[in-house]
Image: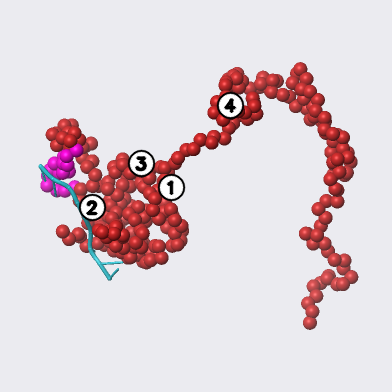
Chain colours: A red, B cyan
Amino acid sequence: MALVRPGSGSAQPAKLRWGELEEDDGEDLDFLLPPKQVIGPDENGIKKIIEYKFNEDGNKVKITTTTRTRKLANARLSKRAVERRSWPKFGDAVHEDVGARLTMVSTEEILLERPRAPGSKADEPKAGGDSLSQLGKGGAALKLCRTCGKKGDHWTSQCPYKDLAPQAEAFSDKPPTSDAATGAAGTGKYVPPSVRAGADRTGSDMRRRNDENSVRVTNLSEDTREPDLLELFRPFGAVSRVYVALDKNTSISRGFGFVNFVNREDAQRAINKLNGYGYDNLILRVEWATPRTN
DNA sequence: CATGAGCGC
């Protein structure tokens, strides 16, 4: 049985398809037209161009274009702009005709810093999907950390070593003139943080204050680095430290690491969200870490 | 599977 659409009887003339339509029945007959004429510019800077074309109806039409050259156009520019035109050209523009180009494409090589450390997985497309990228890509800006001096990874406020850095000096009552401080700078001799100027000598070690909010991450792929961990956990709150355990000899990741949060609630939220999270084709385990055994 | 490092007054 044949299916027949209404109105598609055999008497109907075949409809042209879109692709079968003639482009345009007019061939290119421009060679039949008189040549284009350019008159002027005259002493007033007026230039005329006379050309002939066929219009849609196939009739020959004459088109006259009148333009003003720059001499006159200058009158409309600001004095400063006109003056700039007389400046000598420099760089690549030296080889250009006067007025040929007002702007030049610079061929100077400008080296940009890599926004991320080489080897960071942020450079590769992640198999795990895009939900990660929403979790907090820092963007491609150039970042300079004032705490650890590293360029590229993070801002000062996100420095993994922020809480470990000797920052007490800035808040010290006394100017940092102690022997220890100056001696260290002068001789390069090591001065333990607890002895440095401005150090907290009350006995409580403030630099370890956040160690309890420590989260253990296991089942990491072996090419996950600390910057990757930071990127992964940073969206949940201020991170005070990231650490990936490396094999002492081979420097290959042992597949686990730690992330310390400034705030316990942030750590808990990160655990809730990231435990069981697919990362690099592995399912992460994220839990509270038991305190380090010394 | 699995719980992190090092400097030296």
Would you say A60 lies left or right of A201 here? right
Question: Are the residues flagged by discs 3 and 1 from a single subunit?
Answer: yes
Identify the secondary structure beneath mark 4.
helix
Identify the secondary structure beneath mark 2.
loop
Three-letter code for the amino acid on which mark 4 is drawn? Val
Q: CA distance from mark 2 to mark 3?
A: 24 Å
Q: Quadrant of the N terminus of chain A?
A: bottom right
Q: CA distance from mark 4 to mark 2?
A: 62 Å
Q: Which residue is mark 4?
A: A94
User: Is there CB contact under 8 Å for labels 1 and 4?
Assistant: no
Three-letter code for the amino acid on which mark 1 is drawn? Gly
Q: Which residues are magenta?
A: A188-206
Q: Which residue is mark 1?
A: A139
Q: Is residue A208 magenta?
A: no
Q: CA distance from mark 3 to mark 4?
A: 38 Å
Q: Nearer the viewer, mark 1 or mark 4?
A: 4
Q: Earlier in the sequence, mark 4 or mark 2?
A: 4
State the residue at coordinates (19%, 33%): A186
Callout 1 environment at 10 Å: few (<14), some (14 to 19), or many (20+)? Answer: few
Q: Position of residue A217 (x, y in %)?
A: 30, 62
Q: Earlier in the sequence, mark 2 or mark 3?
A: 3
The quadrant in which residue A106 appears is top right
Q: Earlier in the sequence, mark 1 or mark 2?
A: 1
Q: Which residue is mark 2?
A: A210
Q: Earlier in the sequence, mark 1 or mark 4?
A: 4
Whether residue A261 is visible here, answered yes or no, is no
State the residue at coordinates (83%, 55%): A22
